[in-house]
Amino acid sequence: MMKYLQKLGKALMLPVACLPICGILMGIGYALCPSTMQGGEVVGFVQKLGFFLVKAGGALVDNMALLFVIGVGVGMSDDHDGTSGLAAFASWLMITNLLSTGAVTTMMPSIAESATKTLAFDKIGNPFIGILAGIIGATCYNKFKSTKLPDWLSFFSGKRCVAIISGVTSIIVSAVLLFVWPVVFGALIAVGQAIVGMGPVGAGIYAFLNRLLIPTGLHHALNNVFWFDTIGLGDLTHFWAGETSADVTWSLGMYMSGFFPCMMFGIPGAALAMIHTAKDNKKKVASGLVASAAVCAFVCGVTEPFEFGFMFLAPLLYVIYAILYGIFTVVVALLGFRAGFSFSAGATDLVFSAFLPAADKTWLILPLGIAAFAIFYLVFRFAIVKFDLKTPGREDDDLEEEKKAVLANNDFTEVAAIILEGLGGKENVASLDNCITRLRLEIKDNTKVNEKKIKSAGVAGVMRPGKTSVQVIVGTKVQFVADEMKKML
């Protein structure tokens, strides 16, 4: 399971890499054009430029789920073929259309009578469904890409049948989600209602669950309890309406304020820990990913580029990350720091919300931010090193010594044939993939693997990390060997 999650994490790296620049553009855009966030007329060159930048950044941020559809679909397929991306997109269209609010209320009119169930399907186009569609597309591709159909259906043989099978699979998945999704969504709203009366502790529990549920998209259920007027609360709407705690029954802003030190300063601290613990040969790569994500989080509170960059690579660390949010939210609520956001808890929203009546002790962001930066850094660094977590820059697939490995034989066809023979023949190979330096194979019978024979091909080494897993260290020419072996398979 862990290996599968790590593979999913790597597949998400490509779409996640598209997001930081978008978040930065949106942050600059909001600063230039406050009307984009607060409402009002967009006038003058500067404001129109800001509006333009917000829309440019939002083009990808607002369609993040679609990026995950394609990224996971292609990234998790055996040979990263575009066909799997098409199949994933077909799955996404099928699920989101079948489970759209209009469709489900037509099929089951009783759903329209429940505000919670209606809300659940209003939120069906989320990153979780995007990842699910990507997995469906990639799985169908891996299993059915070589399917041979009868002559009268031969046009649909092989890769052409993958999108069709993906669509059929998605119909079944949609039928299951039709009943499961509103139940889970409703349960989370019930949890939110239960913790409303718990004061600062309840705010901390909410913040913890909010982060924990980000991968599934179900955090929207809790957000609607605390931020909007689902049950008569509406922390966000009352805050931006210019009200104060005297106008409501709770300390206004306490369900938003705790996110500011975590997003603005905690994430940069955690990012620095990842950079410092990255392997020497991968520090630049790790810096490029997490540093830009940290800037994105600080400026406008877009955290997904950072979170999706490691949540599947190191699930334990993500749970710790969510716990830190919960702790800081309790502390912030008790200290009386109050700020609100209309987009997310970045510096842009902090500045704008500081002028609202409910804002209080906003100067505390400096000591709270310093504390968040230090604590996130120390906790992340300790956890990464202690548990050898595979955060960006710590993956096992391209160690420096492996990059220096020299293949003893440059006849790639011959090398591939020898390796395949050492693996017990093509009948014994379940799947083949490769990273920068290694062939990664899943085999059916490990007793048929002859490491001595594999090494005779001139490779640098053979590793067997699992009962059915074999990794052959080839070096930087691995792609040529992999291509030849795929032909043989």
Image: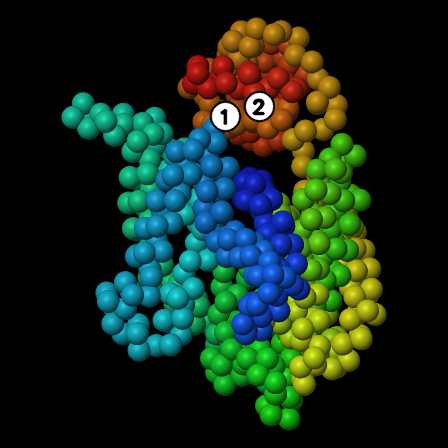
Q: Position of residue 416 (x, y in %)?
A: 53, 13
Residue lying at 44% horizontally and 68% vertically, measured from the top left: 185
Q: Position of residue 469 (x, y in %)?
A: 55, 29
Residue lying at 28% horizontally and 45% vertically, measured from the top left: 168
Which circle marks residue 439 in the picture? 2
The image quadrant that residue 428 belongs to is top left
Are there few (<14), some (14-19), or many (20+) residues within 10 Å of tag 2? Answer: many
Residue 470 visible to the viewer: no
Residue 269 higher or lower than 122, as above or below: above
Q: Tell me the SS state at disc 1.
A: strand
Q: Which residue is mark 1?
A: 432
The quadrant of the rendering that contains the C terminus is top left
Q: Position of residue 420 (x, y in %)?
A: 51, 15
Q: Nearer the viewer, residue 198 or 211?
A: 211
Q: Tell me the SS state at disc 2.
A: strand
Residue 178 higher or lower than 198, as above or below: above
Residue lying at 57% horizontally and 6% vertically, measured from the top left: 411
The image quadrant that residue 269 belongs to is bottom right
Residue 380 located left or right of residue 432: right
Residue lying at 42% horizontally and 38% vertically, measured from the top left: 85
Q: Amino acid at mark 1?
A: Leu
